[in-house]
Image (cartoon, grey):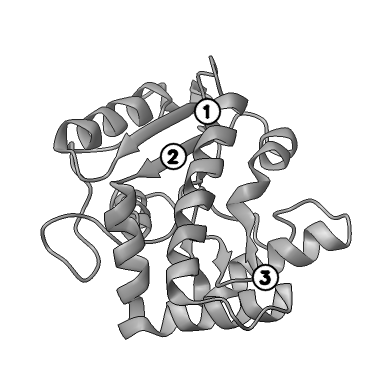
Amino acid sequence: MAWDWLRPKPGRIFLIGHNKCGTRSFHKLLRKNGYSSIHYDKGRLARRIQANFTFSKPLLDGVDGYCGYTDMELCGEFYAYRLFPLLDLQYPGSCFIYNTRDVSRWVDSRMNHRKGKYARAYLDRMRRAYDDHSLTLEDLRQHWEEAWQLHDLDLRRYFAGRSNFFAFNISVPSEQAALCRFLRRRGYRIRGKVLPHAGARSSQASS
């Protein structure tokens, strides 16, 4: 449209759910619709944010040229999406998207990720961090379930009543459609109503 230049540009989008919950599919949705997005980047994204946090710099210093930010983690070390209050403070006008799925299936997906290498690496780092080599994969499973519940509670408390927050279940088509409508209302030009498939399983977006 001729007057599009008058519209304010939409802000950044932070995907603040866990990995194995459609993170790559959401990244692909943004890219497909012409928005720049960074996904994991072999851990470099989370590592840069971690360094910025440690040395009191703006969290996105050095990686601030994107619209979308997804899969901001270092396995068993650092989870940048847990810094959502600081991201909200430092980058006003941003949207925060909480991607969810059935918790038990999410844990299973993490356990099977990279043929179990992800879980073993996480458990090894957890054992070293707590100086407790008796921790087992079953302990890890319980830890992940508890971490999910805590993150869910923290997000819903912090963003209660906020218009820049949207939670959706990646496995429910109607909620994927609602996500696309939400983004359009926020000024993003998103075509369609489903997440593009990306990942190991064709039945749902699980990456």
Total marks in image: 3
Q: Where is residue 185 in the image (x, y as percent from the top left)?
A: 37, 21
Residue 126, compared with residue 171, is above or below; it is: below
Q: For residue 51, what is the image quadrant? A: bottom right
Between discs 1 and 3, the one toward the N terminus: 3
Residue at mark 3: 47
The single residue placed furthest to the left in the displayed view is: 203
Q: Residue 156, labelled with which disc?
A: 1
Q: What element carries label 1?
A: helix
In three-dimensional space, the C-alpha distance between marks 1 and 2, rounded to whole angstroms, equals 10 Å
Q: Do the CB atoms of the residues marked 1 and 2 lie less than 8 Å apart?
A: no
Q: For the residue carrying disc 2, how many other residues have a C-alpha within 10 Å: few (<14), some (14-19), or many (20+)?
A: many
Residue at the (41%, 49%) spot, across then down: 35
Between discs 1 and 2, the one toward the N terminus: 2
Relative to residue 94, is residue 205 drawn left or right? left
Q: What element carries label 2?
A: strand
Residue 77, compared with residue 147, is above or below; it is: below
Residue type highlighted by circle 2: Tyr
The single residue placed furthest to the right in the displayed view is: 55
Instruction: Tell me if I can see residue 188 in this picture.
Output: no
Relative to residue 207, is residue 79 drawn left or right? right
Q: For residue 181, what is the image quadrant? A: top left
Residue 183, compared with residue 38, is above or below; it is: above
Q: Is mark 3 on a helix, strand or loop?
A: helix
Question: Of 184 and 159, which appears nearest the observer?
Answer: 159
In three-dimensional space, the C-alpha distance between marks 1 and 3, rounded to whole angstroms, equals 26 Å
The single residue placed furthest to the top in the displayed view is: 161
Q: Residue 98, labelled with which disc?
A: 2
Residue type highlighted by circle 3: Arg
